[in-house]
Image (cartoon, rainbow, N blue to C red):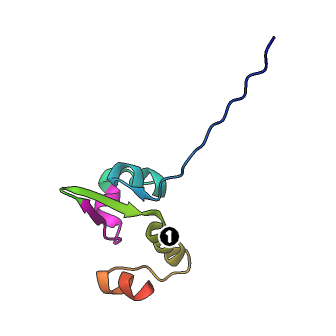
Amino acid sequence: MGNANLNISVIEKRMLNQTESAAYTGMPVKHFKTTCPVQPLEMGRGIRCWDKRDLDRWIDDMKQGTEMTTRDAILGKL
């Protein structure tokens, strides 16, 4: 028998749509919409994506007791 090589490359997404962002944070979409202060980035006409790094920062801040609640607070953390 011949040998077969399987070359799989997985590229991890950095930008997530709303459903993916909610799943990433472990929240239902409805709760994510009303709770998450992280502003999405407009990636094109009607395409809004959340940066995983911003979501991670928000979660880390909540763990430390410093929840970001405004856009200015988020920008101040960048």
**Residue that lies at the very extreme toward the left in this rendered image:** 45
What is the quadrant of the N terminus in the image? top right
Relative height, residue 71 to residue 9 (above, below): below
Measuring 45% from the left and 67% from the top, which residue is drawn there?
55
Q: What is the x, y in percent for residue 60? A: 54, 74
Measuring 39% from the left and 89% from the top, which residue is drawn there?
76
Relative height, residue 19 to residue 68 (above, below): above
Relative height, residue 44 to residue 38 (above, below): above
Secondary structure category for the residue under label 1: helix
Residues 73 and 7: in front is 7
Residue type of the residue flagged with mark 1: Ile
**Residue that lies at the very extreme toward the top in this rendered image:** 1
| Left or right of 33 on screen, residue 51 | right
Residues 39 and 1: in front is 1
Residue bounds of the magenta highlight: 31-43
Residue 33 part of the magenta-drawn span: yes
Q: What is the x, y in percent for residue 41? A: 30, 66
Q: What is the x, y in percent for residue 9? A: 60, 42
Residues 58 and 15: in front is 15
Measuring 54% from the left and 49% from the top, which residue is drawn there?
11
Pointer 1 local density, CA inside 10 Å: few below 14, some 14–19, many at least 20: some
Q: Which residue is mark 1?
A: 59
